[in-house]
Amino acid sequence: MDIKDLNELRSEFEALQKNMQQEGCDDGSCVTDENREDYPDYLVAMYKEVMPPVKSGVYFSRWDLKAMAAELDEHFALDVRERMFQNFMRWIATPDDMKLVMDQFVKNMDMKCDLYREYSERFPSTKPIFDKKIEKVENTKKYLDKVFVEFFT
C-alpha cells in the first residue's frame, strides 16, 4: 500500500465520519423535550426517559441507585436494575419526597457531567462525544422538572 492509497482511505473515512455526524439522531442522540413521550404514570415516565443512557446521557448503575437511596436513608439489596429503581421509587409518598429523589438524580447526573468535562479536557478528540452527553443531561434535567410539575403540583 502506497501513500496515495492511504490518503484515499483517509478521505473516505473522513467522509464517512461526516455523514455519520449529519445522520447523528438515528441512535436517539438528539433526544429533546419535543421527542419525549407523555406517560400516565411518573414511574414509567422516569424509567423510560431518564434511566436509558441513550436518552439521558448517563448510565445509572445498580450501585448508583443504591448510593442515591442511601443518601436518603433508604436501603435495599442489589438486584436487577429495574427492580432496584422500583424499590427506590416506592419511598416516595409526598411531593417533598419526590423532590428529594429528583435531587439525587440531578446530583448523580452533575457528578457524571463533571467527569465528562474532565475527560474532554484530557482527551480533546472526545469533546464532541461528551458534549452530546452533557446536552442530553441538561434536557433530562428539564424533563425531570416537567415530570415534577405534571405529577406533583
Image (tube, rainbow, N blue to C red):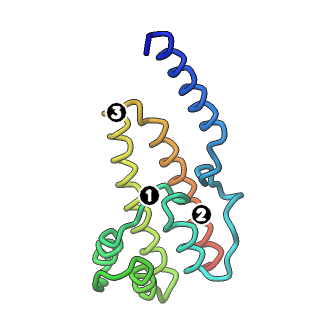
Q: Nearer the viewer, mark 2 or mark 1?
A: 1
Marked residue nearer the N-terminal end (1 or 3): 1
Question: Which residue was labeled with disc 2?
Answer: 143
Nearest the viewer among 1 and 58 is: 1
Secondary structure beneath dot 1 equals loop
Q: Residues within 10 Å of mark 2 (few under 14, many from 20)?
A: many
Amino acid type assigned to the residue bearing label 2 in the image:
Tyr
Secondary structure beneath dot 2 equals helix
* Location of residue 146 in the rendering, given as x and y in whole percent from the top left corner: 62, 67
Q: Which mark is residue 86?
A: none
Spatial CA span between label 2 and label 1: 14 Å
Question: Which residue was labeled with disc 3?
Answer: 123
Secondary structure beneath dot 3 equals loop
Spatial CA span between label 2 and label 3: 30 Å
* Location of residue 68 in the rendering, given as x and y in whole percent from the top left corner: 33, 72
Residue at 38% x, 45% y is: 116
Residue at 64% x, 50% y is: 26
* Location of residue 4 in the rendering, given as x and y in whole percent from the top left corner: 50, 10
